[in-house]
Amino acid sequence: MEENAVMETGDGLQAEHAVEERGGEKAKRDVQQQHMDGSNEEELNKVRLMRALVEKNDPSSKEVDDFMVRRFLRSRDLDVEKASAMFLKYLKWKRTFVPNGSISASDIPNDLAQNKMFLQGLDKKGRPITVVFGGRHFHHKKGGLEEFKRFVVFALDRLCARMPAGQEKFVLIGDLEGWGYSCSDIRGYLGALSILQCKRPNQLHLNHLQDYYPERLGKLLIAHVPYFFMTVWKIIYPFIDNNTKKKITFVENKRLKSTLLEHIDENQLPEIYGGKLPLIPIQDC
């Protein structure tokens, strides 16, 4: 009798969890729909047009939500043809670069060992905050640029998975304390930047991972900037599109906490900047 009671209780709990999961999924879809309702009629119509076009060419696109379709559209100024071509390119890349659906920690051991990227908290707009320590990044020969690109995809996927329902962007704090010549991995920086922005067809086309995470970067705050970094910045800057440039702020050392507090409430600020929250390594999120 007791064993039957336990089994019935277990079945009941499983059923209860299933109901909760379905309820959670429905709530998430409802929130997403509310945010999609914030689009104007032209944008909604173009989302429908683009979805029909890409699903005809690649049935796997049915698995993505309207937010992703809209991001690609916005990155191409609502041009359905250009956005669709870009999106189909992304789907093809995803199948080849991430054949198992995700990058695992075992694929990027050298970059994870540098302990350079963390997540914690939300800014005032509800966007997840990630902190990258540039002084801990070194180009390594073992995995090279290919492993670093896998690391960036791993990190972005982890970051996007933590976004609240209806949120699409994140905030990046680039902390350059301890950054020096040995950290100046220009090819790696260009590869990372190319993922976070979408270049127009008439811009220089980098042979990296560009155009695969459009409209994700909300704000980039660069702190503890050493003088030598500005030499490297002059090389990188021309490769940054105008839309991304508007999201970048260099923070003065003496105004670091006050500047961060303009964007982040103190109870959401990482403790290393005078806030309340400890940083969590990207691989532990």
Image (cartoon, helix red, strand yellow):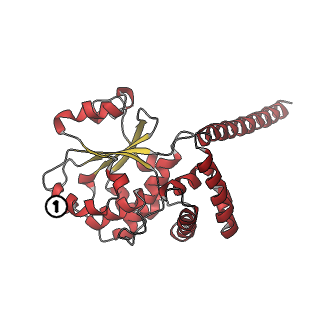
Image quarter of residue 131: top left
Would residue 163 be found to the left or right of residue 172 on screen?
Answer: right
Would residue 253 be found to the left or right of residue 41 on screen?
Answer: left
Residue sitting farthest toward the left: 227
Nearer to us in this view, 71 or 17:
71
Image quarter of residue 144: bottom left
Q: Is residue 183 above or below residue 124?
A: below
> Residue 61 location in percent, x, y?
65, 61
Residue 14 visible to an observer of this rendering: yes
Q: Residues within 10 Å of mark 1 (few under 14, many from 20)?
A: few
Q: Is residue 139 above or below residue 18?
A: below
Residue denoted by label 1: 181
> Residue 122 location in percent, x, y?
43, 35
> Residue 197 location in percent, x, y?
40, 57
Nearer to us in this view, 244 or 78:
78
- Amino acid type assigned to the residue bearing label 1 in the image: Tyr
Nearer to us in this view, 234 or 99:
234
Residue shown at 20%/33% (left/top)? 255
- Quadrant into which the N terminus falls: top right
Element marked by disc 1: helix
